[in-house]
Image (cartoon, rainbow, N blue to C red):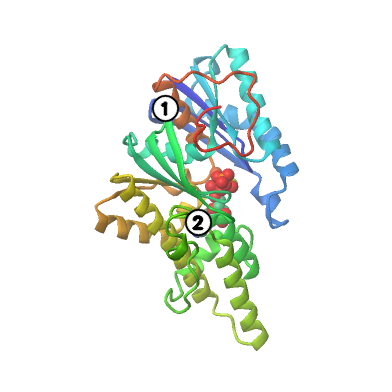
Amino acid sequence: PLILGIETSCDETGIALVRGRELLADVTASSMDEHARYGGIIPEIASRAHLESFVPTLDATLERADVDLSEVDAIAVTAGPGLVGSLTVGVSAAKALALALGKPFYGVNHIIGHIAVDELVNGEIPANSVGLVVSGGHSSLLRIGDIATDVEELGATLDDAAGEAFDKVGRVLGLPYPGGPHIDRLSREGDRTAIRFPRGLVGGRHKEKHQYDFSFSGLKTAVARYIEGLETEGVDIPVEDIAAGFSESVADVLSAKALAACRSQDTDTLVIGGGFSANSRLRELVTERAESAGITVRIPPIRYCTDNGAMIAALGSALVRAGVEPSSLDITVDTSMPMDVIRA
Ligand code: ATP
Ligand code: MG
Ligand code: FE
């Protein structure tokens, strides 16, 4: 079956066509340039941009795949989590298309889509895998019994997401928004052992209760304090070493907890997704540690790690394959959709 996937949870309007696990076309329009000068996403600007980009992006996707809208067998759209206005544009458009074409409609979970997209590149995700989704809004460890029918959250961040912490440290360092990629670039010129920043929720009294949870807010504050301290002393800021030490702390915690989850779930497959999985130190460290633990790490190419329509089409395709019932056309968006809800 041919699945149309629609993603509008944040600032990207992403539309894609997938047949089985084959990606036919994937087009993304982003309003990030408009948000960058405000140093963060402005929800009203994002919703308006989705409205303006929707039809051109849909047309471009159909044209690129050389497909007519009438050939589409099912429509999948992000129903949550995300920004209410942004989500509403995509869900309303998807409902209208489903109704007009008389095709089934699936309102799906964006975060699970970040994992599902890996199927388009690396093939079927084995039953009983562990997923790590790290992005601008989320840092979650998932038990994936089956990507279409059985997902459970093992743990998540108690405060900032990994990408969010990078963007906030980026602001302290005076880097352009979003700061994540800039810190990554700078960190490669620094010494990651020069400054040791704290690891959040690791060991000690957190061992049991928060074994698979994360906390990056204290780390972010520690980095800010460190910089302030140097500024008061009038000392030059070793930006590269700070970026490297900070990246090391985040990558260390993420990879250690993800591999611990794999061991406890007795799985040999770890799938990583979300915009932060572009981070070079995370990729390096998790690959190194997984290798020595005999665990296979699957990370999609960077262009599929950030928000796109392919991830939603991939998840829709998995749902259709598994024979999951479509969503009702009555569903509304869920800005904080729980991780065990794969489709609304
Ligand atoms: P969510 O999926 O939780 O709704 P989102 O979709 O907005 O959030 P993504 O687009 O998946 O988030 O990821 C964007 C985040 O990833 C930003 O915070 C950005 O700074 C961060 N990021 C991207 N590349 C890198 C990198 N190389 N190193 C660190 N952070 C990065
Ligand atoms: Mg984004
Ligand atoms: Fe995302």
Residue 169 in the figure: left or right of residue 341:
right
Q: Quadrant of the C terminus?
A: top right
Looking at this view, name the residue that lies furthest to the right.
Answer: 44
* Type of amino acid at the residue the image marks with label 2: Phe
Toward the viewer: 261 or 103?
261
The quarter in which the N terminus is drawn is top left
Residue 58 on image: x %, y %: 59, 28
Instruction: Name the residue rendered at 55%, 60% in the picture.
Output: 180
Q: Callout 1: 10 Å neighbours few (<14), some, many (20+)?
A: many
Q: Which type of secondary structure does the marked residue at label 2 adopt? A: loop
- What residue is shown at x 36% (from left), y 57% (from top)? 286
Disc 1 secondary structure class: helix
- Where 108 sits versus 209, above or below? above
Q: CA distance from mark 1 to mark 2?
A: 29 Å
Front-most of 106 and 158?
158
In-front residue for pair 224/89: 224
- When asked about the image quadrant of residue 38, the answer is bottom right
Residue 271: x %, y % from top left: 38, 45
**Tag on residue 318?**
1
Choose the circle earlier in sequence order: 1 or 2. 2
Percent across and percent down for residue 207 are 42, 59
Whether pointer 1 and pointer 2 mark residues with C-beta atoms closer than 8 Å, the reply is: no
Amino acid identity at mark 1: Ala
Q: Is residue 295 left or right of residue 58?
A: left
* Residue pointed to by mark 2: 214
Residue 75 vs 36, above or below: the answer is above
What percent of the width, then of the height, locates residue 298?
35, 46
